[in-house]
Image: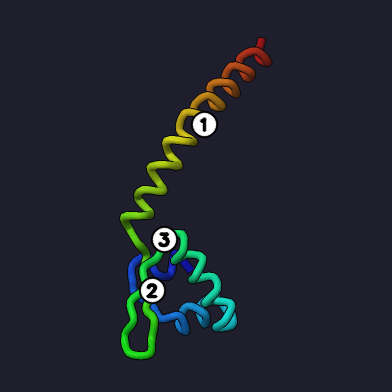
Amino acid sequence: MLELVWDAERSSSELAEAVAMTRPAASQHLKVLRDAGLVQVRVDGNQRLYRVDADRISEVRRQLEGFWGDRLGRLASGVAAEAGEEER
């Protein structure tokens, strides 16, 4: 669902149909995304329109890169070192 609202605002009904979910199931999923701050909602008449919160996504990405960047670098170094030992 997050991908579907990445570049365009979509209604909960549109999203439910696109991912083959019931409307109640889609609403629950959207609530989780909203509570996490990953999507914003705008009310237009009787519709709720969802769109990704790009600022929050950028913040989450920075946090993940900070967390995983060092760890993945160390893992890659360890794998390279082991591969070098096995070649001997």
Helix, strand or loop for disc 2? strand
Q: Considering only vertical position in the picture, is 72 above or below 40?
A: above
Q: Considering only vertical position in the picture, is 50 above or below 47?
A: above
Q: Amino acid at mark 1?
A: Leu
Which residue sits at x=31%, y=55%? 55
Q: Nearer the viewer, mark 2 or mark 1?
A: 2
Left or right placement of residue 72 versus residue 48 in this view: right
> Picture quarter containing residue 21?
bottom right
Asked whether 81 or 75 is in front, the reply is: 75
Name the residue carrying label 3: 38
Asked whether 70 or 45 is in front, the reply is: 45
Q: Amino acid at mark 3?
A: Leu
Percent of width and height locating residue 19 = 54, 75
Which residue sits at x=52%, y=31%? 72
Percent of width and height locating residue 56 = 36, 55
Helix, strand or loop for disc 3? loop
Name the residue carrying label 1: 72
Which residue sits at x=35%, y=50%? 58
**Residue projecting furthest to the bottom:** 46
Compute the Cα span from label 2 to label 1.
34 Å
